[in-house]
Image (cartoon, rainbow, N blue to C red):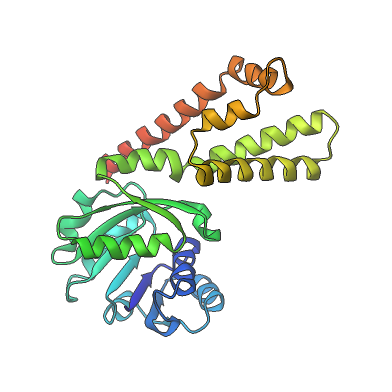
Amino acid sequence: MKIACLGSGKMGTALLKGIVAQGLCAPHDITISDSSPAARAAALAAIPGILEAPDNLAAALPADVVLLCVKPAGIVPLIQSLHQLPSKLLISIAAGIPLAAMDPAADHHRVVRVMPNTPALIGKGASAFSPGRLASPDDCATAASILNAVGSVTQVPEPLLDAVTGLSGSGPAYVYTIIEALADGGVCEGLSKEQALTLAAQTLAGAAEMVLQSGLHPAVLRDQVTSPGGTTIHGLAALESGGLRAALISGVRAASLRARELGRLA
């Protein structure tokens, strides 16, 4: 498989690193193109052996799969610029740009729309994708294998990608806020900022891993550390009185609504 990456920023580079690390593609079968010399240099340094093309067409021409990793406003014009090439699998990571906008521009190309998140940069991403009108089951399998190289992936109907955006796409920002708030609580109780941040971050990471590895519902795991009259139940009561759960649900819904609005504007 030969791959082109048009736009070699952080997310595009993360995908390419995962692809190479998982043996999906050799570095010399990957070609990048980016209008930013700094971005090109960073990608070339991060993944030794990949190739650089002078423009998008030259990068995409030999490729079987073309990763579209430019800003959302540039996605449709970029797809249109590839019209003269033979059929390719185009994988777009642009937030808010619907298949209804990309499929007509793609014409004979096959499109898969992807919503990754930033933990893909460390191989811990949570991604979802939806296939366009011409994308085959094999194309979906290819997209899934690429996303699995940087974390986990699920296929959803396209209307649910807005919910994915509100949950996992924007979710890291919610978690960073929770980590910061937990650490501030620790500082209030006398811990140093460095100690509190480490404890808070590792606590969230460990708890999340227990959910993933155990397969148990979070409520079951929560009950396992909540004893009658103990410290945890008093802490949980304070969180409930502060509206933590309702605030997080509202955050996901607000971000999902905004994703739908952006899609209508595309």
Q: Which residue is drawn at 19% across and 76% down?
A: 85
- In the shown orientation, is residue 177 left or right of residue 187? left
- Whether residue 78 can be seen here: no
Q: Residue at x 33, y 40 (%)?
A: 162
Q: Position of residue 24 (x, y in %)?
A: 39, 74
- Whether residue 205 can be seen here: yes
Q: In which quarter of the image is residue 224?
A: top right
Q: Where is residue 201 in the image (x, y as percent from the top left)?
A: 67, 44
Q: Position of residue 198 (x, y in %)?
A: 74, 46
- In the shown orientation, is residue 224 left or right of residue 64? right
Q: Residue furthest right?
A: 190
Q: Quadrant of residue 144?
A: bottom left
Residue 223 to residue 21: above or below: above
Q: Quadrant of the N terminus?
A: bottom left
Q: How many marks?
A: 0
- In the shown orientation, is residue 212 left or right of residue 73? right
**Depth check: 93 or 215 in front?**
215
Q: Position of residue 239 (x, y in %)?
A: 62, 21
Q: In which quarter of the image is residue 168?
A: top left
Q: Which residue is drawn at 20% across and 55% down?
A: 132
